[in-house]
Image: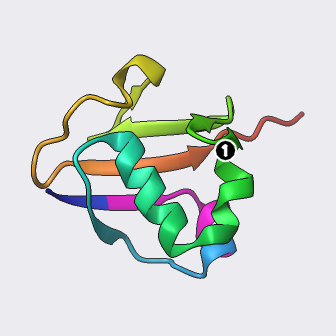
Amino acid sequence: MNIGLSMSDLLKKATGQYEPINVSAETPLECVQALVTRFPDLNKWLYQEPGKLKSHVWLLVNDERIYANDYHKPLQDKDQLFIMIAVLGG
């Protein structure tokens, strides 16, 4: 499955990858894993333990936020996944 993957600015800076990339994956979590395989330093940014994303990591499929119970649902070819680090401040 060919999935377009984009990242928030913080992750773009961490990877040096400023353009969307394509990954071959079946589910949102597989997309994240493919990204970490390509950019191993992202592991510390995205995962609190193997297979469990940190709570401030948000995934959006076709501009709609998904939650942990959707991370293993199949994606459709040409879906767009956006990975965001939710940063709050005041």
Q: How many marks?
A: 1
Question: Magenta stretch?
Answer: 5-13
Residue under label 1, please give it: 47
Q: Is residue 51 above or below residue 25?
A: above
Q: Quick check: is 9 in the magenta stretch? A: yes
Q: Nearer the viewer, residue 56 or 54?
A: 54
Q: Quadrant of residue 47?
A: top right
Coloring scheme of the render? Answer: rainbow
Q: Quadrant of residue 71?
A: top left
Q: Position of residue 69 (x, y in %)?
A: 40, 17
Q: Residue at x 37, y 70 (%)?
A: 20
In the picture as drawn, the residue positioned furthest to the bottom comes out as: 16
For the residue marked with disc 1, what is the amino acid?
Tyr
Q: Residue at x 41, y 42 (%)?
A: 29
Q: Quick check: is 23 in the magenta stretch? A: no
Q: Quadrant of residue 41?
A: bottom right
In the picture as drawn, the residue positioned furthest to the front comes out as: 50
Q: Is residue 54 above or below residue 78?
A: above
Q: Nearer the viewer, residue 66 or 49?
A: 49
Q: In the picture, which quadrant includes the C terminus?
A: top right
In the picture as drawn, the residue positioned furthest to the top comes out as: 69
Q: Residue at x 60, y 82 (%)?
A: 16
Q: Position of residue 18 (x, y in %)?
A: 50, 77
Q: Position of residue 88 (x, y in %)?
A: 78, 35
Is 13 positioned to the left or the right of 64 in the image?
right
Identify the secondary structure beneath mark 1. Answer: strand
In the picture as drawn, the residue positioned furthest to the left comes out as: 77
Q: In the picture, which quadrant includes the N terminus?
A: bottom left
Local packing at callout 1 (Cα closer than 10 Å; few below 14, some 14-19, many 20+) is some
Q: Is residue 37 above or below residue 31?
A: below
Q: Is residue 67 above or below residue 50?
A: above
